[in-house]
Image (tube, rainbow, N blue to C red):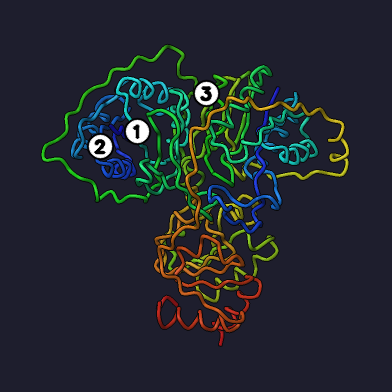
Amino acid sequence: MVLVIAEQRDGVLNNASWEALVAAQQLDEPVRVAVAGAGDGLAAVGAELAAADVESILTVDHPELESYTPDGFVAAFAAVVTDTAPDRVFLAHTYQTREFAPRLAARVGRSLIADCVGVRPRDGRLAFVRPMFQGKFVADVAAAGPAPHFASFQIGAFRPDALERGAAPAPVTAFPVTLEPGAIRQQIEVPFQEAKQAVDLTQAERIVAVGRGIKGREHLGLVESLATALGAEVAASRPICDSGWLPMDRQIGSSGQTVAPKLYLALGISGAIQHLVGMKGSRTIVAVNKDADAPIFEVADYGIVGDLFDVVPAIIAALDA
Amino acid sequence: MKIAVCVKQVVTREWPLRVDEARTWVEDRDASFEMNEPDAYALEEALRLREQHGGEVVVCSAGPARAAQVVREALARGADRAIRVEGGGLAAADAAMVAEALAAAMRDEQFELVLTGLQSDDQGFAQTGVVLAELLGIPHATIIMEVQVADGRLRVKRELEGGWFQWVSMPTPALLTIQSGINQLRYATLKGIMAAKRKEVRVVEAAADLVPRQEILEIRVPEKTKQTHMIAGSPSEAAAELVKVLREEARVI
């Protein structure tokens, strides 16, 4: 049996949970779903999940689980895993999963194969496909040791619309948990956004984005010149904003903005997955990089292998011509 | 405050990586290595907390003998002493195995705060710190962008998806995984490099009974999902061709 741990907040199901469900349905094994929370919001999510063709939905309802905390969710789902004894536990690779799932796996003496983009049979075992070395390689990884085996799936790895729906709603059952007083050591505050983003890159028709290849803040003028020539906004991968060379609100990727402009020109960006998720929906992607093996070329429509300090002035000149 | 910071040695970003003959790891015999970048931010945060609150910073690393290089570097940047867990099998080990190796060497130290980088540049598990917290029995929080310490409690700013944040507080001892960009890194000074030579490094053999929980069956270059039109030629030829296709084929400029 595959146990899928779904994610919800304030009664809203995280869409990525459907993708983890699709991954589980591929395996031709019974599927159950567990989701934690409290009260009516959780009940609504349970009913929504019941549309999937699965054996059952377990709602883990406790006032202390209304808001996510790592201690609360590890304790609650450890009880579910121990009680239901699944062969596998699947989750969507969200920030929340990244925080509690490795600890959940460790609590029951197992490990998590994280950030997978696929799963397939290989020599009588199940191979989980995951990126390594910043996306330069992918690896087939198998779980060693006894079940349950935990895996999380990258958002976008499976299509939520591939979900198999049941003829009738799946049964929804409450899973009672007790949490020891003081079991939850983290105290959380209300989520917030930093001061309103000055730049809304999602509206830009063209974006020129720059990465580590730019080497120093003093070279940014070159990128700005190209952006001006193209009528584009300037954006960056995370390391550039980390270094303070461009403000954080110019960052594209999982921790920044997600964009889909007509033209996305990536200069000296290697294409780590955290960046790709923020821009791979762009209509036309151009990559300029010294390294012919850089993962950015896998999503690019047009690629130039070369030093951006040679290529960018040449593009500016060609636009002028 | 007694702070531990865990650092990993990884192949430098610039190194042209190739898959090894067995196709289960990368060819790294002649590679150059560096401190995993997110761990460098964790180290910097530990040094800043020591400057504010006093105490000591102990750098901890688990890996093959060559990992001594990043331990020395951390000492040169200002860590007070080091614990290095040595094991040949740790270079390509899964996160749980590395965390077990670290926990065994760190447990008796009773650290008040343990910092790790968010994830490593090689296998990218983003798990070693989280599992280490479980093994040490202390609370944790991940992807931290700011750390405040007051009255034996931590208040930390955790990054959520899509530009959202959340403050989380918890008692010490605790473990935090640090996001890149939380601070500006300092580099080793000559004085720091000289001082590092006199600092204590405790070398511990990794336990022989560490059991892998994951097995790499094969590593390969990803299959292309898109037809990429690679434009060759000199910079000016390639640029002229690019502008032409963007105008006439893609019609985006």
Say which chain tag 2 marks: A
Query: Residue B252: which quarter of the image?
Result: bottom left
Query: Residue B210: which quarter of the image?
Result: top right
Q: Amino acid at mark 3?
A: Glu
Q: Amino acid at mark 2?
A: Glu
Residue under pointer 1: A88
Residue B174 in the image, given as x and y percentages of width and height:
58, 23
Residue under pointer 2: A29
> Residue placed at 11% from the left, 37% from the top?
A168
Q: Classify residue B190 as left or right of residue A37.
A: right
* SS assignment at label 2: loop
Whether discs 1 and 3 lie on one chain: the answer is: no
Query: Residue A299: which quarter of the image?
Result: bottom left
- Determine crowd level at label 1: few under 14, some 14-19, many 20+ residues with C-alpha closer than 10 A: some
> Residue placed at 77% from the left, 45% from the top?
B187
Q: Earlier in the sequence, mark 2 or mark 1?
A: 2
Q: Mark 2 and 1 residues: CB-CB less than 8 Å, in contact?
A: yes
Q: Which mark is residue B134?
A: 3
Number of numbered labels in the structure image: 3
- Quote the CA–CA distance across marks 1 and 3: 21 Å
Say which chain tag 1 marks: A
Residue A66 in the image, given as x and y percentages of width and height:
35, 26
Q: Amino acid at mark 1?
A: Arg
Whether discs 3 and 2 lie on one chain: the answer is: no
* SS assignment at label 3: helix
